Image (cartoon, helix red, strand yellow):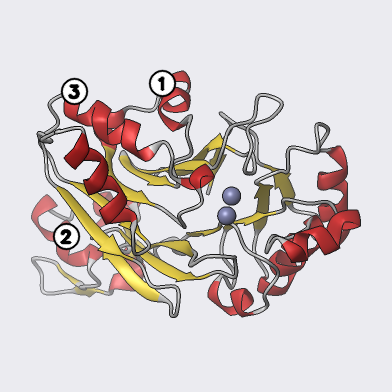
Amino acid sequence: MQFELTILGCSGAIPAYNRHPSSHFLNYNGHGFLIDCGEATQMQMAKFNIRRAKLDHVFISHLHGDHFFGLMGLISAFNLNYREQPLNIYGPEGLEEIVLTHFKYSKTKLSYPINFMTTQDSRQEMILDLPFLTVESFPLYHRIPTTGFLFKEKKGLRKIVPEKILQYNIPVTEIAAIKLGGDYNDKNGTIVLNKELTKPPSKPRAYAYCSDTMYNEHLVEIVKEVDLLYHEATFKNEHASRAKDTFHATTIEAATIAKKSVAKKLIIGHYSARYEDLSEHLAECISVFPETLLAEEGKVYSI
Ligand SMILES: [Zn+2]
Ligand SMILES: [Zn+2]
């Protein structure tokens, strides 16, 4: 199953050095999930060949403009393309009012329904439960109510060993039951145990998105052992006091969360406009957590 992340925007509050405000696109086997929607999101989607039609779920972490100023444009483009399928938007209190007010005064009647779901910054909760994936929101520690999002793959079915189908001459009609854990009864009445015919499913994978936040060890348990952790690292370590004042994190802090949570890989982003060169960001993180990558726009990260 494809489970991959494309970075559409990796800049902090101000676009700089050809870096754009926050936006991530997650593809799970053709199902699209947009996480934050900074002002250049649509342009970046076009540039990196991400089809809008694949997108049914949009998650907004908080109401600072660099995380949602692209949303109105995206909703409008769907309308101009005569979208009919519902769009599901998850975000903090106030987002629905902002969007509806905009369309009220532009006298726009959308061609499709929007389902809004308000996220809570006081607790972790499941906000989406699909047959193959769940999404949870969880509190972050920023100047205004902010949540992160945790995408967890569901446990798959057992995998049939192809050679065993031939060996025991198993008819196609029996395959589904075997994948669910059943034994096989052949025509002579011999029982072949499930563990002889199948392998366990792959371990479910997870992606956690920690948008704007200051360092907080409560996150460690929430993102425990995820395969891919995105954690903002707006500042280098030398600007740690600035990070604290603005409720943001440093490189070392992001890497410490990754290390303590035993994440497999860390991606950092939301770089302050004061930095053009990001090599020191990377070096500082690697000194704490070697499996660190810089968020780079257009790059696809396999989970
Ligand atoms: Zn931001
Ligand atoms: Zn913010």
Looking at the rendered image, the disc whose residue lies closer to the viewer, 3 or 2, is 3
Q: Amino acid type of disc 1?
A: Ala
C-beta proximity under 8 Å, tags 1 and 3: no
Residue 26 in the image: above or below residue 61: above
Type of amino acid under label 2? Ala
Q: Are marks 3 and 2 in contact (CB under 8 Å)?
A: no
Pinpoint residue 153: horizontal percent, then vertical percent. 39, 60
Q: Earlier in the sequence, mark 1 or mark 3?
A: 1
Can you say whether 96 is above or below 281 in the image? below
Residue at 70 percent across and 60 percent down: it is: 246
Q: Nearer the viewer, residue 106 or 296?
A: 106
**Residue ID for mark 3:** 80
Instruction: Check if mark 1's residue and mark 2's residue have beta carbons within 8 Å.
Output: no
User: Mark 2 = which residue?
Assistant: 176
- Check disc 1 and report the residue beneath it: 46
Graded by Cα atoms within 10 Å as few (under 14), some (14 to 19) or many (20 or more), the crowding at tag 2 reads few
Quarter of the figure with residue 11: top right
Query: At x 56% / y 41%, what residue is drawn?
Result: 301
Q: Quadrant of residue 210?
A: bottom right
Disc 2 secondary structure class: helix
Which residue extends farthest front?
Answer: 105
Name the N-terminal-most of marks 1 and 2.
Answer: 1
Crowdedness near tag 3: few (<14), some (14–19) or many (≥20) residues, C-alpha within 10 Å: few
Q: CA distance from mark 3 to mark 2?
A: 43 Å
User: How far apart are the two marked residues, 1 and 3, measured between alpha carbons?
Assistant: 16 Å
The residue carrying pointer 1 sits among few (fewer than 14), some (14 to 19) or many (20 or more) residues within 10 Å by Cα, namely: few
